[in-house]
Image (cartoon, rainbow, N blue to C red):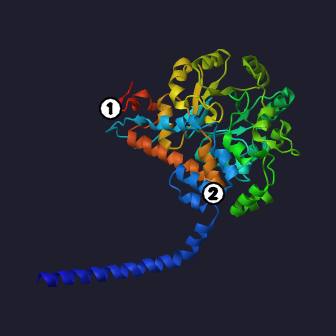
Amino acid sequence: MSAQRNGRARAVTRAGFLPMLARQVRTDLSTAPVALRRRLAAGARAQRAGNIAELRVLGARRVPRTVFDYIDGAAGDELTAERNQTDLRALAVIPRVLTGTVDLDLTTTVLGQRLAIPLLGAPTGLTGLVHHDGEVAVARAVHSAGGLYVLSSAGSRSIDDVAQMSPGPRWFQIYVGPDRGLVQSLLGRARAAGYSALMVTVDVAQAGARERDRRNGFTMPPRVTARSIAQGLRRPRWSAEFISRPRILSQAALLAGASEAAARPLAEMINSQFDPALSWTDIGWLQERWDGPIVLKGILRAADAEQAARLGVAGVVVSNHGGRQLDAAPSSISVLPRVVDAVGGELEVYMDGGVRRGVDIVKALALGARACLSGRALLYGLAAGGPAGAARAVSLLVDELSLAMTLAGAGSVAELDRSWIANAHSDGRTGWSTE
């Protein structure tokens, strides 16, 4: 009797399974052309990436190694770049329960500008090497999500290009070089194009020892060598786009010291654009010539932040330049609380460095940052899938931020404070402390 029942059960199972399988096959065949077009479309693989690490892997496959190492690399042994991420990972978020949170509020304000998300696209140079749309693509991705974009004066697209092609909230970042006439000209162009704030990078007295670039023979403009040809052949799609629409440096960056005629090492080009004599007096010079708020990027000491506040600077970015300068500097997240304690009531504090997950933003905001900047993560997306990949990188960070907020029981970014954060004991114990 039992055998008969088992036989009937198997028959029913087969009878139910086979029609289901047939329906699935018919559906798959009918949608196959559309699915195939989607899989082959530019940026399709990037759209399937589930996190920034996966975009990084895809980006490494799509662009030549020299280009990937330029965006991925850091100074020296890359210890500071590693610290940016490991110190973020060492922080835990302590969730609250039964908060009844249904709707999340991710909005924040930066210098009076209301943003839908607490994310700023960090200034990145030579972005056109990654994809010909360069800064325009990244700006559009950030603006579409409700964030703010910061254009680098060492970028591949011009001040006017980005303003016209992605008319969202934006700041202009500048390296103050020895040609102050050029600096003043750039300030005027940025203000006329609607850039609302000036970000001054202050941690580049000269270029850091970026050893991947040295080993790769990275020059500006790029030299055609047997190695570069071999790398280009292995990346045919990138090569075809680069040859047909090369965008390396904007005219402003070229005027600042990058010659189109003579190729030279990247560090040498960088050093030609910066003034090692830059001092606090020059911040006053900039304030006299910029009709708007000024933010200093590259602050790691509380005393420097206090000096910025005394001068009337509107904000500071706690940053070690992504580990691309001094490879013995502390991580951004580790010094953020001290800077916030010193000047948090006098100016706005932002954090840049190591953000690879949306929960990293939660941690920085809880420790006092007004918003986070992200550079590499967005460039990994751009490398992986062009504009669609940049948009995917932003959406991943925002989706992860929303999920982390929900699971932590936080209804808005305004609620976050240090009570949400725990630190692992450095001696290897398994306990946690909120001190």
Mark 2: secondary structure: helix
In the visual, does 1 lie left or right of 251?
left
Nearest to the observer: residue 323 or residue 115: 323
Residue 339's tag is: none
Residue at x-position 47% and y-position 31%: 366
The C terminus, quarter of image: top left
- Position of 42 relative to 336 (above/below): below
Pointer 2: what residue? 385
Q: Is residue 205 visible?
A: yes
Mark positioned earlier in the residue sequence (2 or 1): 2
Quarter where residue 211 is shown: top right
Q: Are marks 2 and 1 in contact (CB under 8 Å)?
A: no
Q: Could one spot residue 166 in this view of the protein?
A: no
The image shows residue 330 at horizontal and vertical percentages of 55, 28
Report whether 313 appears left or right of 400.
Answer: right
Residue at image x 77%, y 28%?
A: 176
SS of the residue under disc 1: loop
Q: Give how far across and how far down residue 284 sits, in percent.
A: 75, 18
